[in-house]
Image: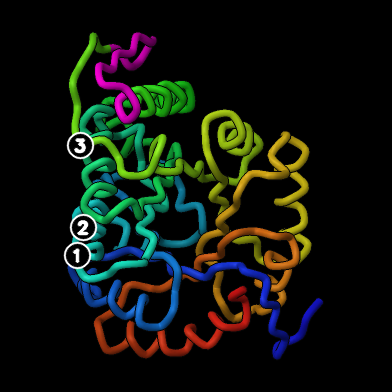
Amino acid sequence: MAGDTAEFGSGMKLGISTFVTDRSAAPHVLARALEERGFDALFLAEHSHIPASRESPYPMGGELPDMYYRAVDPFVALGAAAAVTTELTLGTGVALLIQRDTIQTAKEVASLDHLSGGRVLFGVGVGWNREEMRNHGTDPRTRGALLDEQLAALKEIWTREQAEFHGRFVDFDPIFAWPKPVRRPHPPIYVGGISPAAVRRAVKHGNGWLPFAAPDPAGVRAQLDLLAAHGGADLPVTATSASGRDRAVLDAYAEGGVERVTLGLAPQGEVDTLRRLDELAGLVPAYRG
């Protein structure tokens, strides 16, 4: 394993994953700072709300941070980011599609891709907060099947002049829906999650896999082995929310040939955000091809 001073020249890209909230640095400030420092991508999380009375435990343990219920809409924030950048990849990490209207989401993604010149990477997942899903009318027990149909329906809307879809959960007669995405046939869909079900969905329905970054090199190898075991050895991987403090993890992903790792950035005010980005930016040239 390469040490702290190794320079891979691997071509592995580094981006940033974060929440944009009503208290954090504005998305246009954040995006401009990322592009100036050589980061490849900005991935924004999504939660429409958090029910005040919850049963679903926070997956990371402990109390749920307030960024989960203070998050701004990712497409609005990424639109602001698109307006002040020219190269930055604009990602959702992840959009909770199962809590969204399929046709309206197709419009939002295509509009962002159109206005940004084809820079959207659409990360999706089934989510973890069952109470939040229920408030949107989604049955947690069938959220995986719903997501599968929604992904198929999105592709129809994005690629056909008259799109229609008839499934158990998503059902509409022929429609016109523009704009069409700039990226053809459509923006890449990356499926989030680290379960075998998420990996299978990424291989079957997606163009890439979007797992949370593993905590150690052994975990990195286990993730890549899991993907290969499900027929996804050649599937692009973006591992999200790495701490950036453990170079061994980044080195393992680079050695494994993943396309991108995003570094987790806590939502803070502008001054603290820029200071932290200055610290993380030193990693970018070590992995750039």
Q: Which residue is denoted by mark 3 in the rendering?
A: 179
Whether residues under marks 1 and 3 lie with C-beta atoms below 8 angstroms apart, the answer is no
The residue tagged with tag 1: helix, strand or loop? helix
Question: Where does the image place residue 99, in percent across and percent down from the top left?
Answer: 30, 34
Q: Is residue 49 visible?
A: no
Where the N terminus falls, by quadrant? bottom right
Looking at the rendering, which quadrant does residue 84 occupy?
A: bottom left
Q: Is residue 150 left or right of residue 286?
A: left
Residue 241: numbered disc? none
Question: Where does the image place residue 140, in percent across and percent down from the top left?
Answer: 42, 28
Residue 83: numbered disc? 1
Q: Looking at the picture, which amino acid does disc 3 mark? A: Pro
Q: Which residue is denoted by mark 2 in the rendering?
A: 79
Q: Is residue 18 left or right of residue 233?
A: left
22 above or below 135?
below
* Residue drawn at (47%, 62%) of the image: 62
Number of numbered markers: 3
User: Dot 2, how many residues are within 10 Å of its Cα: few (below 14), some (14-19), or many (20+)?
Assistant: some
The residue tagged with tag 2: helix, strand or loop? helix
175 above or below 74?
above
Which stretch did the figure color magenta? 157-171
- The residues tagged by marks 1 and 3 sit, at their Cα atoms, a distance apart of 18 Å
